[in-house]
Amino acid sequence: MRLIRFVFTPFLMEILEAIYTRRSIRKFEFKDVSDDILQNILRAGMSAPNSGGQRLWQFVVVKDRDQMEKIIDAYPYAKPFASRKRLLLLVQKQLLYLRKSER
């Protein structure tokens, strides 16, 4: 078995610190974020690892008030976001696996 040797650079130490001190947040403040922050969030989400590069999700930013109301009406857990200027949705794609005989 071949061992991999790591050189603990300051950058790697920062990454390890972020991993070890990560925590889940369950309470949020409803504050608007700038377009720059939203772009950074989207870029980070699109760069997240995934199985085989399949990208089984899509990000949708909704700014149109009529569309937002339709989404909020259809999804009861979205009601707290009714007063926001925009919604960021994470939409999971569904894959249908067919047997070779069904293709």
Image (spheres, rainbow, N blue to C red):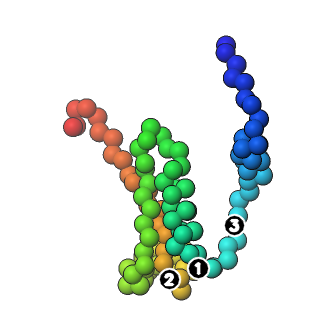
Q: Which of marks 3 and 2 is in front?
A: 2
Q: Earlier in the sequence, mark 2 or mark 1?
A: 1
Q: Is residue 16 visible?
A: no
Residue 89 place in picture, x, y as percent: 47, 67
Q: Name the secondary structure under disc 1.
A: loop
Residue 26 place in picture, x, y as percent: 69, 66
Residue kind at label 3, given as amino acid type: Arg
**Relative to 57, does residue 97 appear above or below in the rendering?**
above
Left or right of 13 on screen, residue 29: left
**Which residue is label 1 attached to?**
32
**Which residue is label 3 attached to?**
26
Q: In which quarter of the image is the C terminus?
A: top left
Q: Residues within 10 Å of mark 1 (few under 14, many from 20)?
A: few
Q: Can residue 95 be seen in this view?
A: yes
Left or right of 7 on screen, residue 83: left
Instruction: Say which residue appears at 51% left-offset and 58% top-offset.
Output: 43
The part of the image, by quadrant, that contains residue 54 is top left
Instruction: Say which residue appears at 43% left-offset and 79% top-offset.
Output: 63
Q: Which of marks 3 and 1 is in front?
A: 1
Give the CA separation, mark 2 to mark 1: 8 Å
**Relative to 93, does residue 83 appear above or below in the rendering?**
below
* Label pair 2/1, CB-CB below 8 angstroms: yes
* Label pair 3/2, CB-CB below 8 angstroms: no
Residue kind at label 1, given as amino acid type: Asp
Residue kind at label 2, given as amino acid type: Lys
**Which residue is label 2 attached to?**
85
